[in-house]
Amino acid sequence: MLDFQLEPERAESSEDPLDPRRARVLIVDNERPILAMLAKVLTTAGYANVQTLSDSTEALERLHTSPPDLLMLDLHMQAPDGFEILENLRSQGGELEKLPVLILTGDHSMEAKRRALMGYARDLLTKPFDPREIMMRVENLLKIRLQERQLLAELKDLREQVKRTQRELNHAYIDAIARLQTVAGNSGKSVAHHHLRVAELSELIGQAMRMPKNNTFLLRQAALLHDIGKAVPDPERPSLHHATRGSELLASARSPYLRAAQQIALSHHEHMDGTGEPQHLGGPQIPMLARIVAVADRFDHFTHPQTAEKPLSREDALAMIEERAGKWYDTTVVAALRNVVPNIHADLGGSYLQRSDVV
């Protein structure tokens, strides 16, 4: 055991979370005098949470149940030795894999150093130890460790903040959509309900097609504006197709919802065979969201006509759409509608759904 003298740490323990003296250090070595010396070096330097173990089996159990901030590990011990402990830690993944390890060894061979560092040890000290070097190595490793932990915590907080901000933006967007929906439905309550039903039915069709939840949510919000061009016509171009007008109103939008709404507004009257309007697109040229809204829109017009026509039953409306599957409508979307229709709410008045989150 080395003879050394260090002045005791005079500064009071800092409340700074990056102060290495607040960290938990575990020292594992089968030589008790070495353990005593290392513990004295660290406690004299102000480290208040230093634990020592000479039993490597107990040490491995401690690492799994209560991992420290820094492990100081001897290489050559009874089984499990330091190499086995390193291998065990790295096989665990997660926090144990990231645990910084300072190797303590009297083995000066390059092979021992290579094996230790390849086992992801962060640093290595060879015996006999210099107390001041011990403190510098420990302090450096712990500062890095605590900074990494703080950065991860800040990153987690930032992600939560981004999620909260995104939720707030989504709510603001949905609030704006509700107001645009009022404009789009200014011809009367039945028109406003049409927009809502088309949006809901489009969402249900998207779910039946196993679209991701985020996409079906976006689809429902964007579909609310499929006929916005009817509500705000262009007085200088009265013959302009409302789909083109709607696309112009929503052009250059930065919101993903409004970009999707523009696609839908422009293309929901296109047909798979190219006979639709206004661009005579066909097949894959028609955006999928617009193909879904086209089917939902037509189904709702059949079952809730805004003229004096007699409404069709669900079954008849579905049959009419199926007759045009592959010609006007995407066959996959029509098949999804077939699965959805038996399950939608029986009351087809203002909404297809019994839910509290509709706009």
Image: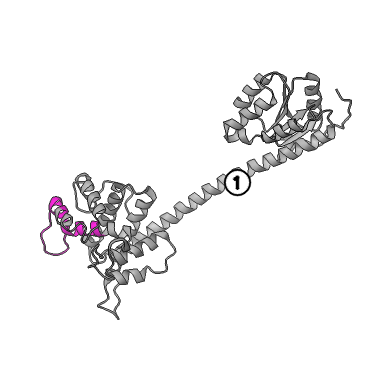
Q: Position of residue 101 (x, y in %)?
A: 70, 33
Q: Name the residue at the bottom extreme.
A: 236
What main secondary structure does the magenta stretch of the protein show? helix
Q: Is residue 305 magenta?
A: yes
Q: Image check: 193 left or right of 261?
A: left
Say whether residue 272 is visible. Answer: yes
Q: Give the residues in magenta.
A: 294-318
Q: Is 240 placed above or below 139 here?
A: below
Would you identify the image quadrant in which residue 16 lies?
Answer: top right
- Depth order, front residue of 310/171: 310
Q: Image check: 306 left or right of 74?
A: left
Number of marks in the rendered image: 1
Q: Position of residue 7 (x, y in %)?
A: 87, 32
Q: Is 16 placed above or below 189 here?
A: above
- Depth order, front residue of 126/339: 126
Q: Position of residue 182 (x, y in %)?
A: 30, 63
Colouring rule applied to residues:
one colour
Q: How crowded is the residue under tag 1: few (<14 C-alpha within 10 Å), some, or many (20+)?
A: few
- Depth order, front residue of 235/97: 97
Q: Position of residue 12 (x, y in %)?
A: 78, 36
Please tell me which residue is depicted at 67% across the width and 43% down the height of the picture: 147
In which quadrant will I find the C terminus? bottom left
The residue at which mark 1 appears reads as 154
Please tell me which residue is depicted at 61% across the width and 34% down the height of the picture: 97
Q: Secondary structure at mark 1?
A: helix
Q: Is 330 placed above or below 72 here?
A: below
Residue flagged by tag 1: what amino acid is it? Glu
Say whether residue 344 is visible. Answer: no
